[in-house]
Each structure stands twice: as C-alpha cells, then as structure tokens.
Image (spheres, rainbow, N blue to C red):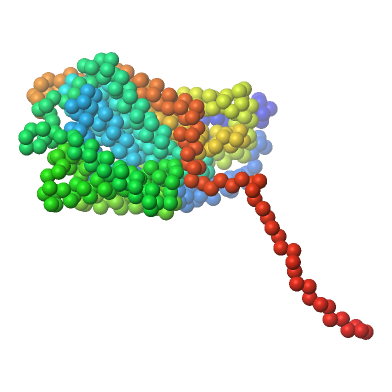
Amino acid sequence: MAHLLMENMAPIMFLALVFFLLLGYPVAFALAANGLLFALIGIEAGLFRPDFLQALPDRVYGVMSNDTLLAIPFFTFMGLVLERSGMAEDLLDTIGQLFGPVRGGLAYAVIFVGALLAATTGVVAASVISMGLISLPVMLRYGYDRRLASGVIAASGTLAQIIPPSLVLIVMADQLQKPVGDMYEGAFVPGLLLSGLYASWVFISSIIAPETAPGLPPEAQTLRDGDGKTRRFSLLVVTIIATVAAIVFMRTFATVKAGSDYVVLTMSVGIIVAFAIAVINRLLGLGLLSRLTEEVIFVMVPPLALIFLVLGTIFIGVATPTEGGAMGASGALLLAAIKGRLNLVLIRQAGEATAKLAAFAMFILIGARVFSLTFYGVNGHRWVEDLLVSLPGGEMGFLLFTNLLIFVLAFFLDYFELAFIVIPLMGPAADKLGIDLVWFGVMLSANMQTSFMHPPFGFALFFLRSVAPKEDYVDRLTGKIMAKVTTGQIYWGAIPFVVIQLIMVILIISFPGLVMHYKSGVPQVDPSTVRIEVPFETEVMPLNIQPGR
C-alpha cells in the first residue's frame, strides 16, 4: 500500500480532489483542504519536503499583490453599474425597434445587445438575467418559439466569456503567464464571429420555420416619425458616412495599420462621427435624421464609446488592462450620472456584487495555490506533462484530449474553477509541444463557454430559469394569458447553441489566424539579415619607458 501511494501520489491526489468536489464541498475549501491533507500524508511517507509549506505565505501574498487580477473587480463594477443604470433595457428596446420588423428581428437584437453587454459587463449572470427580464416577455408576447427565445438569450449572455474585456480571458492570461492585452486581441475576432454564427442559426430557423421567429407587428413599432413611418434609410446613410470618414482618418493620420488595433480605432472614430452628426442635427433642428436613427445613435454611442476607449487604450499599449478597467469603471459612473440614474443604492448594489464575485475568485485562487504547492511538491506537474505530451497523435491528439476533457469537466465546474485548477496543468504541456499559449487560451475559453450552456448544470440556464415565468401569467400589455416556460424548453433551446460553440472551437483549431492576428503588429526580425559590427580600431598609447627602469 505504501509503495502504491509513493508511486502514484499525484494521480491519487487529483482523484481525491474530484471526489471532494462530487461530494458538494465548496471548490476553494476542497482545493485547500486536499492540498494540506496530502502534504501531511506526503511528509509522513517521506514523499513531500516540509520546506515546501514555508512557501505558502509567499504564494498567498503573490495572489493578493497580483496587479493583473485587479482588472476583475474593475471590469465587474463597470458592467454592473451600466446594467443597473438601465443601459441594457434602453439598448434592447431601441435595437429591438430597429430589427423588429424583420423575421427573427428580436432575436437578432438580443444577440447584438448580448455582444455589447459582453463587452461592458464581462459577467454572464448579469447579461443573461438582464436580457431574460427585459426581452423574454417581449419575444413571448409576439409569438416566438420558447426554445428559440430561451436559447438565444442564454447563448448571447455567454458571449461575456470570450468578447473582451472578458473576466475569463484575464484569468486565462494570468494562469498561462501571457499578457492580457494579447489575449484580448486574440479573442476579438472569434468573439465577433461567434456572434455571427448565433445570428446565422436564427436566420436558418426563421427560414425553415417562420412561425418560430415572427417580425414585430406595425402597432409594436413605436419609434415612428410624425407620418407614422419608421425610416431606416437615414441610419444607413449615417453609417456609410461615418465608416468612410473613419477609414479616411485612419489612413491619413493613424500609424496603426494592422490587426485588431486598426479595427477598434476605426470603429471608435466612426462612432464619434455618427454621434457628431446626430448632435448637430438635433441642435440645429435640421430634420435630416429620423426619430429611430437619432434614438439608435444616442442609445448606442455612449456604451460603444466606453468600450472602444477601454479596449483601444489596451490594444495600442497606452494602458494596462488594470488601468483600462479603472478607466472603464469611472466611465460607467459618468454615463450613469449623465443619464440621471446614479445614486447611492446603485453604487451599493454594484459594489456588493463586485465584492462577492472578487472574493469568490480570490478564495478559489488561494485554494488552487495551496493545492498546486503540494501537487508540484510530489512532481504532479511532471506526471501531467508527461501524460499529455505522450498522447498519441502529437499536437492534434493533445488538442483533442484537452478539449474533450474541458467539455466533460464543464458539466460539473464553472469557468473560474476550470481556469484555476486545470489550465495551469495543461499550459506547460502545450508550451512544450510548441503551441502558442495565447491561441491555446482563446481556444479553451471558447470551449469553456459550454460550461454555462449544456444541460443539466449550465449556469446560464439556471440564471434564465430564475427569471423565466414558471407558471401561466397575464401579459401586462395585451392582457392575454401566456403559457409558462418549462425547464425542458430552456434545455432543448440551449443544445443548438452548444453545437455552435463547439463549431467555434473547431474553427479556431482549423484557422489559427483567427487568433494569431494579435502578432500582426509585432515587428518581425529575420535573423539572417542581422549584422553585428564590432569596431576594432583603437588608439594605441605609446609606452613611456625610460632606461634603467
């Protein structure tokens, strides 16, 4: 028995952790207790040096003094202030009016707003609950299929995991020891592409079964001009003008010419131009823009401006992610004040929610450090690395195994737990195989989205279940009796979007350039062109040697 323990200390320790988690113990305490328990067992068996435990205070202090992790409470606070100040409600109402008459328009609006909320909240719970409360009753009122409506809302909320400034990407960068800015740039295109894939599924559903996603009836289109029409042509004209102006400005004055930096900065200039047009039109009373166009611009531009201000400064290297998060939190307070919705109740609620999430993440990380200290002390990292590197199929076999493992573990663990427990064990093996760790982190982040979506333990499904009607109810606008949303409908609605998330993982593996563009702005040096010239000409001082000396 003692020999078996000595030979397999690391795998036994890992299986014991799984056992503790399945028993339902809190993850942070299960990690710490497991680490300390096996440290004592290892000391008694002579497999673990007691000196290792002396490093524990330094490890805990290292967590508390990590500047990168400060971005988590900053971005969380920014998102919660914007969400509680009514930004989500304003966006969903206005964008719903914009897309509403189109078949599936409300679903497109939810996806679009979900992407915007993802870039401002960074918190899945806030996005799902906001859209569930605001958009689900509207979608049910106008005849949307309950499975499609539930799936769209839950999936759009999970975009907060991969669209910067995602909390998952901050943790992933910290665990893989890579810059957060690189992780953000790498995830920018996959996040937008995933939003497009969601919209594509809505389009396919509306074509195959039009009754599942009807357009808004005329009486529901409230943003009309005086003659009763909702003109969208002026919005198209403003978009074209703003786009052309932004491209001309960037070509003329900007030094950034590639990658996500160029896209973010171009869009930033474009929304400034659009906002300026709307302000001039309103101040001068020109009447060039429709009511719908003005409303869309004035509702969308403030959060977009804040998003691009934060991401733009991070991408071009002006600010670190922590500084960008602090700037975003300050900007969120300013926007809430401008809207007249900033008060002590809002600040207290956002502060309490931020403190809870930050403490949750910090305790898990401290527990993970205790566990990893013992795990590394018994050479567990070498056991995992040898196991993963020796998998059949080389690099592709490793990627298939890690993605399958993450997908299965996501049934039981959330993204924080996966990032703090599993990712540190996989990173060294990926690095040894020559895999770019930023690309690896973005790929796993896309996979970890499924932890929120697949039944029966998907957290996004639980969040939506908490706000979806559990019993038949009377619609407050029409007075009709509406049927409840069942748990089965929520689960069935999530399955197509889980498949789409897995397709996104396959696309990232098949087309690495979706992520690797983050290196496009880095100067590339050809070693063969490097010349090192060392000057050999030196001034020779004459020796003053006198005879007899």
**Which corner quadrant of the image does residue 195 belong to?**
top left
**In terms of depth relative to the viewer, which is nearer, 484 or 261?**
261
State whether residue 100 appears in this view.
yes
Outermost residue, top side: 208
State whether residue 41 appears in this view.
no
Where does residue 18 sit, x and y in percent of width and height? 50, 28
**In terms of depth relative to the viewer, which is nearer, 522 or 69?**
522
Where does residue 369 sit, x and y in percent of width and height? 52, 42
Indicate left or right for 148 with 472 as reference: right
Residue at 92% across, 84% down: 547
Total numbered labels: 0
Quarter of the picture containing the C terminus is: bottom right
Quarter of the picture containing the N terminus is: top right
Outermost residue, left side: 227
Indicate left or right for 246 with 480 as reference: right
**Which corner quadrant of the image does residue 435 belong to?**
top right
Residue at 14% across, 48% down: 282
Where does residue 95 sit, x and y in percent of width and height? 22, 35
Residue at 74% across, 66% down: 537
Q: Measured along the vertical axis of the image, is residue 33 above or below residue 308?
A: above
Residue at 37% across, 34% down: 192
Q: Measured along the vertical axis of the image, is residue 52 above or below residue 105?
A: below
Where does residue 503 sit, x and y in percent of width and height? 43, 24
Outermost residue, right side: 548
Indicate left or right for 416 with 209 as reference: right
